[in-house]
Structures are given as C-alpha cells and as structure tokens.
Image: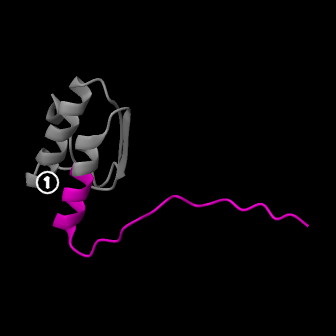
Amino acid sequence: MQVNTIEDKRHFKLFAQPPRLYEAMLEDIRNARDYIYIETYRFTHDKVGVMFRDALIVKAREKVRIRLLIDSWGGMTNESFFE
C-alpha cells in the first residue's frame, strides 16, 4: 500500500509583544512584490496606524495589489486617512 504525504511548508510565529509583531508585519509589507492582504480589527489614526498606512501607500505606488479588511467597530478611520 502506497501512502502519499504532503510536506507542509507553512510556518507561523507567535508574538507576545505587539511592537515585535508590528515590526514583523511591516517587514513583510516592505518585502511584498505582488499582493498584500490584511485583515484587522483596529486601524486608527495613531502612531502604529500611520506607520502601516505609510508602508501600504508606498507599496500601492509600486503597483502591489492591496486588500485591507477593517472591522467597522474597531476601525474608526475614514477614507481621507489614506489620501
């Protein structure tokens, strides 16, 4: 009997400190070439939100496809924040 196996090449990291998570996410954004998909509960006009916004704007100008899904309750940001 032959058993087929699939090698799982996915990996993940757990972060206990939000600043380390943010830096890892920003590094992934900076390295993106084709697309960026982000789903988040909170995206506001604060220090962290501005860092993410600015990084995403740079990538959008590089023609990287960006999809950003923000929760309507936690995301108290309007479209002008991204202009």
Q: Where's residue 68, x and y in %?
A: 34, 40
Q: Is residue 70 magenta?
A: no
Query: Secondary structure beneath disc 1?
Result: helix
Q: Where's residue 45, x and y in %?
A: 12, 47
Query: In front here: 78 or 17?
Result: 17
- Residue 58 lies left or right of residue 6; in this view the side is left
Quadrant of residue 32 within the rendered picture: top left
Q: Is residue 23 magenta?
A: yes
Q: Where's residue 15, x and y in %?
A: 29, 71
Quadrant of residue 17 within the rendered picture: bottom left
- Which residues make up the magenta segment? 1-26
Q: Report how many numbered discs are placed on residues in the image.
A: 1
Report which residue position mark 1 lands on.
48
Instruction: Give the residue at the far left of this rendering.
Output: 47
Q: Quadrant of the N terminus?
A: bottom right
Picture residue at 18% right of the left edge, 40% below the top = 55
Instruction: Give the residue at the far front of this rendering.
Output: 2
Instruction: Give the residue at the far bottom of this rendering.
Output: 16
Picture residue at 29% right of the left edge, 23% below the top = 63
Q: Quadrant of the C terminus?
A: top left
Q: Where's residue 81, x and y in %?
A: 15, 36
Query: In front here: 66 or 12?
Result: 12
Q: Residues within 10 Å of mark 1 (few under 14, many from 20)?
A: few
Q: Amino acid at mark 1?
A: Val
Picture residue at 62% right of the left edge, 60% below the top = 7
Residue 49, above or below 36: below
- Residue 17 lies left or right of residue 40; in this view the side is left
Query: In front here: 64 or 75?
Result: 64
Instruction: Give the residue at the far right of this rendering.
Output: 1
The majority secondary structure of the magenta stretch comes to loop
Quadrant of residue 66 within the rendered picture: top left
